[in-house]
Image (tube, coloured by chain):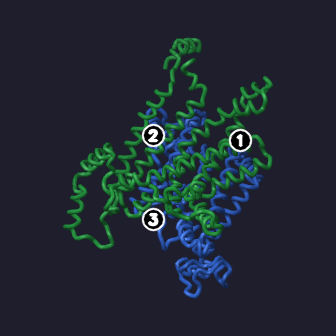
Amino acid sequence: MHDRSGFERAASFLRQRPRRVNALALIARRLLAAIPTLAVVVALSFALTRAAPGGPFDEEQALPPEIRANLEAAYGLDDPVLVQFGRYVAGLLRGDFGPSFKFRDFTVTELIAGGLPVSLAIGSAALALALALGIPMGILAACARAGPADRAIMAFAVAGISVPVFVIAPFFALAFGIWLGWLPVAGWEPGRPGDMVLPVVTLALPVIAYVARLMRGSLLEVLQAPWIRAARARGLPPRLVLLRHALPAALLPVVSYLGPAAAAVLAGSLVVETIFGLPGMGRHLVQGALNRDYTLVMGMVIVYAALMILLNLLADLACAWLDPRIRHARRA
Amino acid sequence: MRGGLWRDAVRRLAADRAAMAGLGILALLALAALAGPALLPWREDQIDWAHMAVPPLGVEGHWLGTDRLGRDLLVRTLHGLRVSLAIALSATLVALVIGVGWGALAGYLRGRADALMMRFVDVLYSLPQVFFVIILTVVFGRGPLAILVAIGAFGWLTMARIVRGQALGLRERDFVEAAVVGGAGTARIVVRHIVPNLLGPVIVYATLTVPQVILVESFLSFLGIGIQEPLASLGNLIADGAAEMETAPWMLAVPAGCLVLLVFAFNFLGDGLRDALDPRER
C-alpha cells in the first residue's frame, strides 16, 4: 500500500459519489447471499445422511437381499451418489422433497405442507409475544435502574435464560393443564385457540427473557450517548427523549437478535410440538431422526434453514429501516 | 506482572457473591456426581421390586423416591449428572482445543490464510446449527460419542472468532517480535507466546460454553436422539419424568431441578469470571 496523506484521503472521499444503500438493493444483495448458504445446507445434509452407516431399510429383521435390492432400485438408491444428488436437487427446485422412507403413504413435501402451517403459527405467535413483552420489560428495567422493578425483571431474565424449554414445557402442562385444568394439555384442533396458549407461552418465555435483557442493556448504553445529552440539554421532555431519540437506536440490537431468536424458537418448537402433541414440522423431524428417515430429516432441515435465512433477511431490513444512517442514505 | 493481574482477578471473583455461590454449588454437584453413586446402596439400573414409583422420603433408603421401574431416583439423577457433566466438559475441551488453535493460527498468520480460515468459520456459522447437530447425532449413531462429535463440530466457532481477534492484536506486541528475532518458528510462537496471553477471554468463554453444551446435550437426550437408556443423562431423565408427571411428578422435578441448578451455577460463575478478568466490560 502506498502511503497517502490524510488530506488526499479526505479529498478522494469527497470526490466519491454518495453511497446509495436503498432497500431494494439491500434485499437483492441479501437474497443473493442466502443462496450459497442454502446450497451448503443442501449439500452438507445430503452428504452427511449418505455417509451415515445404516440405511432407511434397516429393520429389526434383516430384509432378504433380493427385496432389499428391489427397494433400493425403486427409490433410486443404487445409482451413483452424484446422480442421486443431482436428482435430489432437481426435485428440490420443483418443490419435490422426495419420498419419506418410513411414512410410506406420504411424500416429504406433503408432510412439510401439513406441518409447516402449525409450526409457523406457534413460532410467529411466540416471536410476536416475545417482542411485545420483552421490549417493554427491558425499557421498564432500564428506566427503573437498580430499583425493585429492575431487579425483578432481571431475575426473571436470568431464570428465562437458564431454564430450558424442555423443562418449562412439562411443568406448564402439569400446572396449567393437569392441576389447574385451565388449558388443554395436548392436541391441536382448528378453531380451538386454547390449544395454542401453552405452546406459545412456553416457546416465548426464553426469548422474552433474552429480549428484555438485551433491550435493557442497549437502552442504558444509548442513554449515555452524546446526542441524548444534547436532546436533554435542549430541554426536551424526558418522555420524548426516551421514545423519539433513544428508543429507535436502542432497538437495533434487539432487531438484530431476531435471527438468533428465530433459531431458538424453531429449536424449541421441536420440544414443544413433541410435548404438547402438535402436528407440526418439529415432531416430524424428531420422528424422522429417530427412524433414520433421511429424506424426511433433510427436507425438514432445508425448510428450517430457509425459514431462518428469511427471518435474518427481515431482521436486516428492519435494522436498515431503523438506522437513520442507512435510511437517509438516499438523501445524503 | 501477570501474577498481579491474576491475583486481582481472584480477589474480584472472591468478592462476587453470586459467582462464589455458583462455584460452591458446582463443587457440591461435582462431588455428589463423582462420589455419590458409590456411597449409595443402589446401582443406577438396579430395580427395587418392592418399591416402585415411591415419592421422595416415601420409604427408608430411597431419599428422592424411585421411578416406575423401582430404580432409585437419587442414584439415577447423580448418574445422569455425571454423564451430562462429562459430555459437557469434554465437548468444551474439544471446542477449546480446535477453536484456540484455529483462531490463534489465523490471527497470527493474517493475510490470505486468515481470510480463508475465517471464511470457513463464517460458512459453518451461517448454518442452522441445532439441526445439523441433530443430523450428526443421528449419523454417528446416537450415543455419548455422537453427541461429542456433533457438539464439538460447531462449538469451536465462536471460540475461534474470539481468539483470532485477540491474536491479531497480540502478534503486534514486542514480545512476539522478540521471539521472531530469536528465531522461533510459527508453531512455537503460537503455542508459547500467543496462546498463553489469551487465557483470560478463553477461560471466560469456556465457562460460559459448558452450560450451553449441557443444555444442547439434554435437549437431544430429551428428544430421544442423545443419550439412550439404560444410560441416564439429565435430558432423558427429564423426558421419563415428563411422561410420568401426572402420577409421579417427582420424577420430573428431581432431574429438572438438578439441571436448572447446574446451569444457573455455571452461568453465575461465568458472569463473575467475565467481570473479574475483563473489568472493562459493562
Counting other residues with Cα less than 10 Å from the Cα at mark 1, is it few (<14), some (14-19), or many (20 or more)?
Answer: many
Task: Name the quadrant of the C terminus of chain A.
Answer: top right
Q: Name the residue under label 2.
A: B117
Cα distance between the residues tagged 3 and 2: 30 Å
Foreground pick, B83 / B114: B83
What amino acid does circle 1 point to?
Ile
Q: Mark 3 points at which residue?
A: B143
Counting other residues with Cα less than 10 Å from the Cα at mark 2, is it few (<14), some (14-19), or many (20 or more)?
Answer: some
What amino acid does circle 3 point to?
Gly
Tell which tag, 3 or 2, sits nearer the viewer: 3
Cα distance between the residues tagged 1 and 3: 44 Å
User: Callout 3: residue from which chain?
Assistant: B
User: Callout 2: residue from which chain?
Assistant: B
Q: Which residue shows up at 56% across the image and 68% down it?
A: B242
Position of A209 with respect to A142 (left or right) is left
User: Callout 1: residue from which chain?
Assistant: A
Q: Name the residue under label 1.
A: A139
- Whether residue A234 is situated above or below residue A253 in the rendered picture: above
Residue A151 rendering spot, x and y as whole percentages: 76, 50
Residue B89 rendering spot, x and y as whole percentages: 56, 59
Are discs 3 and 2 less than 8 Å apart at CB?
no
What amino acid does circle 2 point to?
Met
Residue A173 rendering spot, x and y as whole percentages: 59, 64
Q: In which quarter of the image is residue B237?
A: bottom right
Chain that appears blue: B
Q: Chain A: what color?
A: green
For the residue labelled by badge 2, is the local secondary structure a helix, a strand or a loop? helix
Residue A220 rendering spot, x and y as whole percentages: 72, 38
Q: Which residue shows up at 74% across the image and 30% down it?
A: A241
Q: Which residue shows up at 59% across the image and 85% down it?
A: B51
In the drawing, what numbered circle is on residue A304? none
Counting other residues with Cα less than 10 Å from the Cα at mark 3, is it few (<14), some (14-19), or many (20 or more)?
Answer: some
